[in-house]
């Protein structure tokens, strides 16, 4: 495949993953092998909806250099490790998909795969935690590749290896299907408890971005919870709080942060940009699924306060400014 076609394939795949709900915003990354030493990889900090073939750099994993006007994804080390280990792998997808991310927090102990699923996915293993883009994370993933070709990265997401683009996409969808099965079996199907909506609350729900996904309603109780996934830490910081369904409490909370859980109702969000609001809706739903699952498993699964603060700071200074550039 010519460079132009290979780069366009990566860009087009980003939009396919968006449509399938397997990634959002700039999270995750995609690559396609060009030859034994080089691969095309999605660029750092550019949203998939805006990505074009010419934006995709080609990275030389032997020289540590790249061709193109944009920097390659910070997770290029993980892709390089996989291509070195597996000569038959020609396409890699790193996703932040909802249900696989929940198991990336709680662990794979409850992941019962059929023999066919194991064969298709090449097994599933868990890589220990490392901050995004670091050598530590790449080393942990490399270790996990010793036993599987589909790897869940603790607190982070999944990396899926394919012989080609279609194979990688098929595996990403199957992974989400089996993880959804595990999570829903564990958390059960009982309806969540909702409160009656007053006229005041109804008006407020229309005035801001609001989501009442059942997973979000289910965790909108108590004092809230600390980030378990690093993309939540990046966009929201250390924790998301819960407030009573009173206008004054909600307004006070939204004056301090971009999103707040409202007891018995769901989540209210306010951001300057519409796509930030939509990204937060997706992120909070995913965080809620992980929280419900870890609670059901008796796993705490929280990121350290230091890691949360660090990722939030880096995100605000770097990635949030680059997203649409």
Image (cartoon, grey):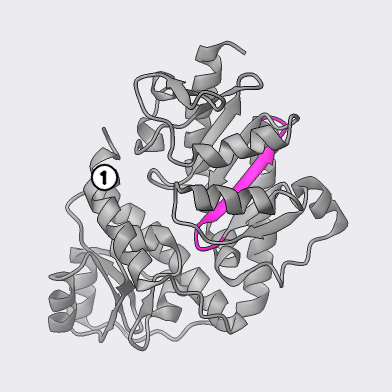
**Residue at (24% x, 70% y) in the render:** 205
Q: Nearer the viewer, residue 6 or 206?
A: 6
- Establish if 270 lies above or below 299: above
Q: Quadrant of residue 249?
A: bottom left
Residue 73 relative to residue 1: left or right: left
Q: Is residue 160 left or right of residue 248?
A: right
Residue 190 seen from this side: no
Q: Looking at the image, which is closer to me, 115 or 238?
A: 238
Task: Find disc 1 in the rendering and name its residue.
Answer: 318
In the image, residue 146 above or below residue 11? below
Magenta-highlighted residues: 154-164
Residue at the image position 40 percent from the left and 57 percent from the top: 231
Count of labels in the image: 1
> Which residue is farthest right?
115
Quick check: is 203 in the magenta stretch?
no
The residue sitting at the front extreme is: 63
Q: Determine whether, in the image, residue 89 is placed left or right of residue 270.
A: right
* Residue 103 on image: x %, y %: 60, 66
Element assignment for label 1: helix
- Label 1 packing within 10 angstroms: few (<14), some (14-19), many (20+): few
Based on the displayed image, in which of its 4 quarters is residue 234 positioned? bottom left
Q: Whole-percent x and y of residue 297?
A: 61, 81
Residue found at x 55% / y 32%: 31
- The correct choice, above or below, for 277 with respect to 7 in the image is below
Q: Position of residue 57 (x, y in %)?
A: 44, 23
């Amino acid at each position: 495949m010519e460079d132009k076609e290979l780069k366009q394939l990566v860009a087009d795949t980003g939009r396919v993953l968006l449509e399938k709900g397997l990634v959002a915003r700039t999270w995750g990354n995609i690559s396609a092998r060009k030859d034994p030493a080089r691969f095309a990889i999605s660029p750092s900090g550019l949203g998939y909806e805006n990505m074009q073939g010419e934006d995709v750099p080609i990275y030389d994993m032997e020289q540590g250099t790249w061709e193109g006007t944009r920097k390659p994804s910070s997770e290029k080390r993980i892709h390089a490790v996989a291509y070195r280990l597996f000569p038959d792998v020609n396409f890699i997808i790193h996703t932040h998909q909802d249900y696989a991310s929940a198991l990336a927090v709680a662990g794979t102990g409850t992941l019962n795969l059929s023999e066919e699923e194991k064969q298709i996915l090449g097994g599933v293993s868990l890589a220990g935690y490392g901050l995004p883009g670091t050598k530590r994370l790449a080393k942990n993933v490399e270790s996990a590749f010793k036993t599987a070709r589909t790897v869940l990265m603790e607190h982070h997401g999944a990396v899926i290896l394919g012989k080609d683009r279609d194979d990688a996409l098929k595996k990403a969808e199957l992974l989400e299907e089996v993880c959804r099965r595990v999570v829903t079996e564990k958390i059960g199907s009982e309806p969540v408890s909702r409160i009656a909506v007053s006229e005041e609350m109804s008006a407020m729900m229309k005035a801001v971005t609001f989501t009442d996904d059942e997973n979000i309603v289910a965790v909108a109780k108590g004092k809230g919870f600390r980030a378990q996934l690093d993309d939540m830490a990046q966009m929201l910081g250390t924790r998301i709080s819960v407030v009573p369904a009173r206008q004054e409490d909600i307004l006070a909370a939204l004056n301090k942060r971009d999103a707040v859980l409202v007891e018995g109702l769901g989540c209210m969000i306010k951001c300057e940009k519409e796509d930030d609001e939509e990204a937060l809706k997706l992120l909070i739903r995913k965080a809620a699924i992980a929280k419900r699952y870890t609670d059901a498993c008796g796993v705490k699964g929280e990121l350290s306060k230091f890691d949360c603060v660090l990722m939030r700071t880096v995100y605000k200074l770097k990635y949030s400014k680059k997203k649409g550039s």
